[in-house]
Image: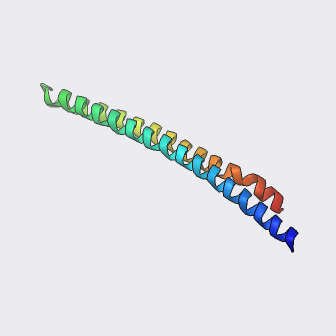
Amino acid sequence: MTQTYEDFSKYGKEFADTGLKSFASLSKGAQAIATEAGEYTKKSFEAGSAAFEKLFSAKSLDKAIEIQSDYAKQSYETFVAEATKIGDLYAELAKEAYKPFESIVAKAK
């Protein structure tokens, strides 16, 4: 009976330690994602402001359409690149959060 309690206590402590390590990984990954999203928002706002200034100073309709087309293309390309980067950060977050539990899962098999 004492051995079972000691084993249970040992596994409980191990699981708690693993949970804390996983939480630390989640916190670190979430911070990286938030930082990346904040930087993207700032850059996007700056690009939009610059495009609006160019658009406002356009002398002809053709030039305005060209400016708008260039801005739309650039915005789309930037969005796709950023979405890919954030997707990679989420994938890395999941891997890092699971990593502490790998040893427990291996022991359970």
Residue displayed at 28% across by 31% down? 46
Q: Residue furthest bottom?
A: 1
| Position of 8 relative to 56 (above/below) | below
Q: Nearer the viewer, residue 104 or 80?
A: 104
Classify the position of the C terminus by image quarter. bottom right
Q: Residue furthest front?
A: 2
In front here: 86 or 99? 99
Q: Is 107 on the left-hand or right-hand side of 51?
A: right
Which part of the image, by quadrant, shows the N terminus?
A: bottom right
Q: Residue at x 20, y 33 (%)?
A: 52
Residue 69 seen by the camera: no
Q: Position of residue 41 (x, y in %)?
A: 35, 39
- Considering only vertical position in the picture, is 23 above or below 8? above
Q: Residue at x 38, y 39 (%)?
A: 38
**Display coloring:** rainbow
In the displayed structure, does residue 11 sit left or right of residue 67?
right
Which quadrant of the view contains residue 28? top right
Look at the image and tell me whether residue 59 can be seen: yes
Query: As drawn, is 58 to the left or to the right of 97?
Result: left
- Percent position (x, y) of residue 55? 18, 30
Name the image quarter holding residue 80.
top left
